[in-house]
């Protein structure tokens, strides 16, 4: 049996990139499925970053 150790929720969407993140300007809001709108604060998305909700 193969076991993989990853971080995040089993049903997490967009761990490596969030839907619409690239198109969103810094300071605007992007949608994180299962979370809501998050405020983009840099050009690099990080799952571990604490974005403003």
Image (cartoon, grey):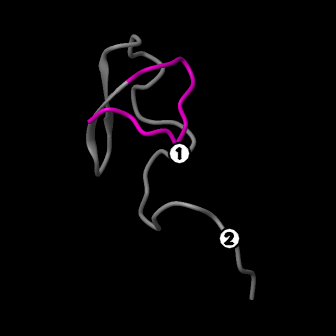
Which residue was labeled with disc 2? 5
At horizontal 42% and vertical 39% (from top left) the residue drawn is 50
Element under disc 1:
loop
Q: Is residue 26 left or right of residue 34?
A: right
Element under disc 2:
loop
Q: Position of residue 33 (x, y in %)?
A: 32, 46
Which residue was labeled with disc 1? 48
At horizontal 63% and vertical 64% (from top left) the residue drawn is 6
Q: Position of residue 21 (x, y in %)?
A: 43, 25
- How crowded pointer 1 is (Cα within 10 Å; few <14, some 14-19, many 20+) is rated as few
Q: Nearer the viewer, mark 1 or mark 2?
A: 1
Q: Is residue 50 magenta?
A: yes
At horizontal 58% and vertical 61% (from top left) the residue drawn is 7
Nearer to us in this view, 20 or 5: 5
Q: Name the magenta segment's main secondary structure.
A: loop
Nearer to us in this view, 48 or 11: 48
At horizontal 42% and vertical 16% (from top left) the residue drawn is 23
Question: In the image, is residue 48 above or below residue 19?
Answer: below
In terms of sequence position, does the residue under pointer 1 or pointer 2 come before the other?
2
Q: Position of residue 35 (x, y in %)?
A: 28, 47
Cα separation, mark 1 vs mark 2, equals: 16 Å
Name, please, the residue furthest toward the right.
Answer: 2
């Amino acid at each position: 049996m193969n076991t993989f150790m990853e971080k995040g929720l089993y049903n997490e969407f967009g761990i490596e990139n969030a839907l619409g993140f690239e198109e969103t300007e810094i300071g605007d809001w992007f949608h994180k499925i299962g979370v809501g709108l998050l405020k983009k604060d840099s050009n690099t998305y990080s799952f571990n970053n604490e974005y403003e909700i």
